[in-house]
Image (cartoon, grey):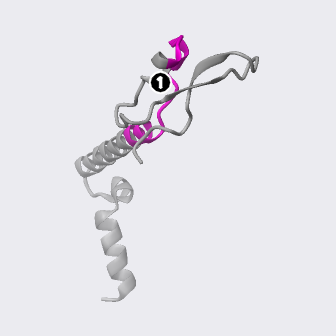
Amino acid sequence: MPAWQRLKDEVSKHHNVLNIFTAITWQERLANALQLCVNLTFIAYFAALFFALEYPEDTGLCDDQGTEQECLEIFSLFETEVGICGWTLSPYDRRSTICIFKVGTSGLN
């Protein structure tokens, strides 16, 4: 059997998207479509989960802190040594100090 024929047979047997259109019975087509949807759902869920862990978002928790001590006591769930907030000069007036979210300091590194 030529190599291109073997390749064609393998792709037609194991490729989820092509099996939706090339399966012989409608039950096989439906099962392949369902399997593809489940696989894509799992991939999207875990991609979102890992992105949320690696790139945390500013939830506004730092904005509510009024003192430097309160500000520096807020930690990430995964990094208990490095705080997610920083006490720094206000970018608005450059005279007062405020608690702000430190971008890129948290996550799974």
- Residue type, mark 1 in image: Leu
Q: Which residue is rendered at x = 61% and y = 18% of the image?
A: 98
Q: List the residue tagged with mark 1.
A: 72
Q: Which residue is rendered at x = 40% and y = 38% of the image?
A: 53
Residue 101 drawn above or below residue 47:
above
Of all residues, the one furthest to the bottom in this rendering is 2
**Place of residue 94 in the rendered image (x, y in percent of width and height, measured from the top left):** 75, 21
Quadrant in the rendering for residue 9: bottom left
Instruction: Name the side, left or right, on which 71 lies relative to 53.
Output: right
**Place of residue 93 in the rendered image (x, y in percent of width and height, measured from the top left):** 76, 17
- Residue segment shown in magenta: 48-68
**Place of residue 57 in the rendered image (x, y in percent of width and height, measured from the top left):** 50, 29
Q: Residues within 10 Å of mark 1 (few under 14, many from 20)?
A: some
- Nearer to me, 84 or 5: 84
Is residue 21 magenta-colored?
no
Number of numbered discs on residues: 1
- Nearer to me, 105 or 71: 71
Q: Which residue is rendered at x = 36% and y = 34% of the image?
A: 80
**Place of residue 58 in the rendered image (x, y in percent of width and height, measured from the top left):** 52, 26
Residue 76 drawn above or below residue 107:
above
- Nearer to me, 19 or 92: 92
The quarter of the picture where the N terminus appears is bottom left
Of all residues, the one furthest to the front in this rendering is 69
SS class of the residue under badge 1? helix
Instruction: Name the side, left or right, on which 94 lies relative to 50.
Output: right
Residue 11 drawn above or below residue 95:
below
